[in-house]
Image (cartoon, helix red, strand yellow):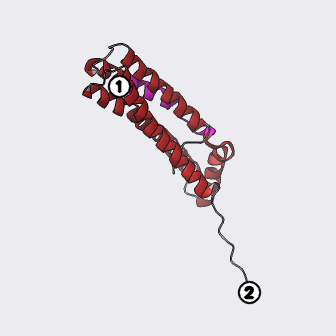
Amino acid sequence: MTREPVPSRPPGGAREVVATAALLAALLFGSMAVGLAIAVTAGGGSPGALFVGFMALPLAFGVSVMAWRSIVGAWFLAILARTAIRSRGDEGRFREEAARSFRPIQEAGPAALPGTWVFVPTAVLVGLVAAVAMAIVGGGDRVSAPALVFVAALALGLILRALARRGLLPLPDE
């Protein structure tokens, strides 16, 4: 009688999934809270300032993550296309080339993924647009509220980049 192998669990398991979900929720809702706090304290609490404050940082978060996923997705496609061309239709050779091409990522982890730089300029761009909008619709100080929104977006971009480089953001294929 032969025993069938027991399937192994992926590393991290449920605990890692819960931790990642909690981190993403904290980033999303925390950025909303920071934006609203800026709108209420420095933006005068006008409806326009509240809307911009509520949307600016979560939008910077979402756009930055999508930009990173796009860069990594294009990078993976380029590697697969190069591998397919090099293998010239031989399945065994394709598997060898693919294993060789993706080995640095398996060894180095998320730090080997390209494009983490995109978090900062994307968040800064969204922050700049939000700062201009806050200056136009804000009822409070016309300088400090936009400046705070911009600085918060810059800080969010730097935090997201650091988290992505440490592998704490979900990889683009998940």
Q: How crowded is mark 2: few (under 14 residues within 10 Å), some or many (20 or more)?
A: few
Q: Name the residue under label 2.
A: 1
Would residue 119 appear left or right of 40 to someone viewing this image?
right
Give the amino acid at mark 2: Met
Secondary-structure class at tag 1: helix
The answer to which of marks 2 and 1 sits earlier in the sequence is 2
56 displayed left or right of 154 = left
Q: Which of 153 and 10 is in front in this view?
A: 153
For the N terminus, the image quarter is: bottom right
Question: 122 or 89: which is nearer to us?
Answer: 122
Q: Of tags 2 and 1, which is closer to the observer?
A: 1
The residue lying at 44 percent from left, 35 percent from top is: 61
Give, as a single range, the part of the protein colored magenta.
111-130
**Residue at the location (37% across, 22% down)?**
41
Residue 40's mark? 1
Q: On the rendered structure, is 138 left or right of 23?
A: left
Figure check: 80 above or below 47: below
**Residue 58 in the image: x percent, y percent?**
40, 35
Can you tell which mark lies on residue 29?
Answer: none
- The chief SS type of the magenta part is helix
Percent x, y for residue 9? 64, 62
- Can residue 83 be seen here? yes
**Three-letter amino acid code at disc 1?**
Val
Q: Position of residue 142 (x, y in %)?
A: 32, 14
Res. 74 in view:
no
Q: Residue furthest right?
A: 1
Which residue is at the front of the view, 31 or 121?
31
Helix, strand or loop status at disc 2: loop
